[in-house]
Image (spheres, grey):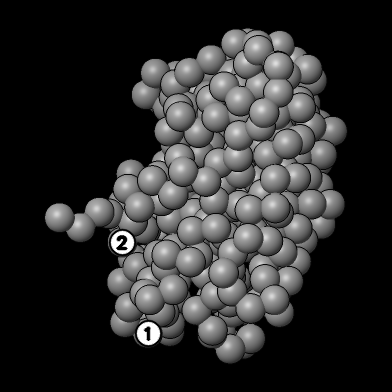
Amino acid sequence: MHMTLLEEFEEFLNSHLLSTESFHPHFNEAYRKMFGAGGKRFRPLLLLGTLRAINPLLVRNAMYAALALEMIHTYSLIHDDLPAMDNAPLRRGVDTLHVTYDEVTAILIADALNTDAFLILSQMPIDDKSKTTLCAILAKNAGSGGMVLGQALDCFFERKPLDEEQLIFLHKHKTARLIAAAIQMGAVIGGSDVKTQNELYDFGLELGLLFQIHDDIIDATKSSSEAGKPTHNDTDKNSFVNLLGLREATKRRDDKINELKKRSEGFGDKLEAHFVKILNNSFK
């Protein structure tokens, strides 16, 4: 019986997450806690699914890149939940690290995941030039020119309303760039030409904005138990629902789904089918 892509990734994750010999009473347990809590694995599956549509023979080797991406995403969630930021007690349906252990543990585990992601990526069985490209894509989109800048803007401008152009800039960095990076990394591993890589990255930015609009709608409309994290929590934040209203935000989401389905037609049958499946299943 064939495993699904998610099952393959979970098996790889569980066998390749690092473990450290020490006398610390719960370091390794804390390191694995957020991964054991599950999650949609949206970003690693986006990378692997994109690659499978381009060259399925390379999917197994690409698990290293997918795991590195999930480690970066998980470190960002741990930091996002800290008392200095969202002070969230719940993530993926379980207590956050600073609640289970303490704030110091949460900060240091996130720091470790951020650094170890590049160690995992360095172990990927692929040529050095491609490996360097993948490291650069991940760092560029996760760091000061991407996710970290977006988070800084989100925190600084809390309770300070932004206009729509500024809101899009914020969320293109905080959320969309890492999602776009996932698609681009899949294209790089698959050997796509640079023009195609860039087109897929641009598509990924719009997919990332769609993801954020949908997440804002979830925050406004679902309970914490349904979402697996605290909801009704964005009242002071710059969200699409707060700026546009729930009805208009929902319309923007649905319009963007249709726009991206149309746009995916230019990538060939297999990539189109991959992206349409995501658009049909991930934004309900």
Tally the marks: 2
| Residue extending furthest toward the left | 1
Looking at this view, is 170 or 121 the one in front?
121
Q: Provide the residue designation for mark 1.
A: 268
Q: CA distance from mark 2 to mark 1?
A: 14 Å
Residue 277 circle label: 2
How far from the left and from the top, in percent, is residue 44? 49, 54
Whether residue 272 is visible to the viewer of this picture, yes or no, is no
Quadrant (top left, top right, bottom left, bottom right) of the C terminus: top left
Looking at this view, is 259 or 24 the one in front?
24
How far from the left and from the top, in percent, is residue 53? 37, 75
- Left or right of 36? Residue 239 is right
Q: Quadrant of residue 25?
A: top right
Disc 2 marks which amino acid? Answer: Lys
Q: Dot 2 lies on which element? A: helix
- Left or right of 90? Residue 235 is right
Give the residue drawn at x 57%, y 69%.
Answer: 125
Give the residue drawn at x 54%, y 51%.
Answer: 67
- In the displayed structure, would residue 147 be above or below residue 259? above
How far from the left and from the top, in percent, is residue 149? 81, 47
Give the residue drawn at x 66%, y 22%.
Answer: 27
Whether residue 100 is visible to the viewer of this picture, yes or no, is yes
Looking at this view, is 250 or 44 the one in front?
44
Disc 1 marks which amino acid? Answer: Gly
| Classed neighbour count for the residue bearing mark 2: other residues with Cα under 10 Å, few (<14), some (14–19), many (≥20) | few
How far from the left and from the top, in percent, is residue 164? 69, 50
